[in-house]
Amino acid sequence: MDQPTPTVYRTRSWTNRNRALIGAGGLALLLVGYGLGRWQDTPSQSPAAAAEQRAVPSSVPSSVPAEPTPTTPAPTPVKYQVLQAESANELAGIQAQDTGDEGGGQNVGWINRGDHLRFDNFVFGDVPATKAKFRVASAAGVSGRVQIRLDTLDADPVGELSVSNTGGWQTWRTDVAALTPVTGTHTVYVTFTAPDDSEFMNVNWIQFDH
């Protein structure tokens, strides 16, 4: 009896090729599924957020420099004028005379204890005055004291010095008194005191300093 011929002739190699194709198809499906899963796990970003991210510069300074603090300029010291003794607003018990001191002009003399000079509205400024220079002369046998008071005749002295014999009534010397620091504008009193009522000194000028 003759054997019937099959409608499709399947060989071993054809079977192996089909198996390989099926395996490759399965691997491809697995990779596609894995890619879809990763895409779904990635958080979505709105267009506004994406635009904001693009707008941020890649390099941002870590800190912004602070504005410089304005500084107040230091006050300028006043250059004090020389107070000529004979030009005081008040000469109490004191008289002016021609002077033999350098620069000429006049000085004041016949000074006893209890006499005073007064200078109105003297401007010391914002930088404190710390000393006063006196141009003095004396032929007296006693020493007296010169005192500086502010605003009233009986105020406590802010400075004083002792004046001794200079060698003559027109033999001049510059003595310096230390001051309690003084600022602002004041009436300045120069007062005199001595052990007795005898005349004890002459004054040519006074100058405050820093």
Image (spheres, grey):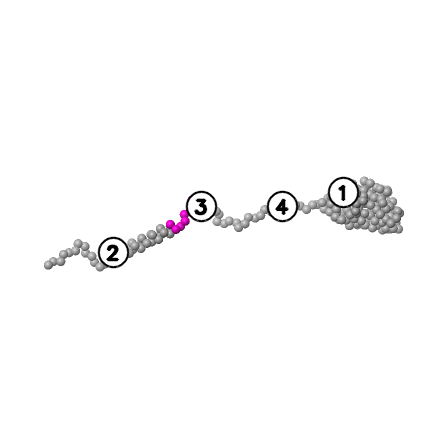
* First reached walking from the N terminus: tag 1 or tag 2: 2
Characterize the local packing of mark 1: few (<14), some (14-19) or many (20 or more) Cα atoms within 10 angstroms.
Answer: some
Q: Which tag is nearer the camera, tag 4 or tag 1?
A: 1
Q: Which tag is nearer the camera, tag 1 or tag 2?
A: 1
* First reached walking from the N terminus: tag 4 or tag 2: 2
Mark 3: secondary structure: helix
Q: Position of residue 204 (x, y in %)?
A: 83, 45
Q: Position of residue 130 (x, y in %)?
A: 75, 49
Which residue lies under the disc numbered 3? 49
Q: Which mark is residue 186?
A: 1
Amino acid type of the residue tagged 4 in the rendering: Pro
Q: CA distance from mark 3 to mark 4?
A: 41 Å
Q: CA distance from mark 1 to mark 3?
A: 72 Å
Q: Which tag is nearer the camera, tag 3 or tag 4?
A: 3
Quadrant assignment for the N terminus: bottom left
Q: Residue 100: within the magenta?
A: no
